[in-house]
């Protein structure tokens, strides 16, 4: 069902800028109108300035005014499934991306809900 989104993430990975880790990551975010926003990781010599593929895709969509999302796919070249980092999970929670499709370099994938990946997440400032 998510083969096409995984393919888009694979193509996004080709643009990865990862000269330091050599770990190329691609993401593809599906919005409610079935438009796809692609992202790749963009590293920096000052490592902390690096941005993950998922956040590049999400911030692209948000900056273009989109707010409703269906799913995001993430892949790398690894034989193992590439799970989003904690910061990206928090950003997915913020924008209520309900499904996260986690893939490997062979095109195999598994589906998770955002609640699977960030249970009991911080999603509101309570008591203020
Ligand atoms: N990376 C991502 O793009 N997404 C993740 O969810 C995990 C990590 C990138 C950041 C860095 O460029 C490289 O993978 C190694 O950590």
Image: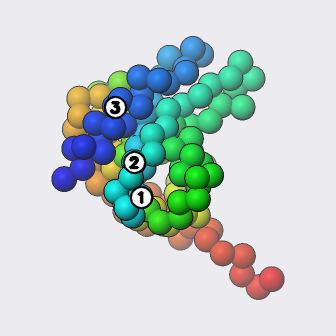
Cα distance in 3D space between marks 3 and 2: 13 Å
Cα distance in 3D space between marks 1 and 2: 6 Å
Q: Residue at x 72, y 32 (%)?
A: 48
Q: Residue at x 50, y 32 (%)?
A: 40
Quarter holding residue 100: bottom left
Instruction: Read off the residue under disc 2.
Output: 36
| The disc label shown at residue 10, or none | 3
Helix, strand or loop under label 2: strand
Instruction: Answer above or below: position of 35 versus 47.
Output: below
Find residue 65 and report its horizontal and vertical position in percent.
58, 59
Task: Mark 1 and mark 2 in contact? Answer it, CB < 8 Å.
Answer: yes
Position of 5 compared to 87: left or right? left
Q: Residue at x 62, y 36 (%)?
A: 51
Instruction: Answer above or below: position of 76 versus 126.
Output: above
Helix, strand or loop under label 1: strand
**Residue 114 in sight in this render:** no
Task: Mark 3 and mark 2 in contact? Answer it, CB < 8 Å.
Answer: no
Labels 3 and 2: the sequence-earlier one: 3
Find residue 113 and report its horizontal and vertical position in percent.
37, 62
State the colouring used for the structure image.
rainbow
Q: Residue at x 80, y 83 (%)?
A: 128
Cα distance in 3D space between marks 1 and 3: 18 Å
Farthest residue, direction left: 1
| The disc label shown at residue 31, or none | 1
Farthest residue, direction top: 19
Q: Residues within 10 Å of mark 1 (few under 14, many from 20)?
A: some
């Amino acid at each position: 069902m998510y083969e096409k989104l995984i393919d888009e993430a694979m193509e996004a990975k080709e643009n990865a800028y990862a000269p330091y880790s050599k770990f190329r990551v691609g993401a593809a975010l599906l919005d409610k109108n079935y438009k796809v926003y692609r992202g790749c990781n963009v590293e920096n010599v000052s490592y902390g300035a690096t941005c993950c593929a998922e956040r590049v895709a999400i911030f692209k969509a948000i900056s273009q005014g989109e707010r409703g999302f269906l799913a995001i796919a993430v892949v790398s070249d690894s034989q193992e499934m590439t799970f989003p980092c904690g910061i990206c999970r928090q950003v997915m929670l913020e924008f209520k991306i309900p499904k996260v499709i986690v893939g490997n370099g062979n095109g195999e994938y598994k589906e998770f809900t955002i609640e699977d990946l960030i249970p009991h997440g911080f999603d509101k400032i309570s008591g203020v």
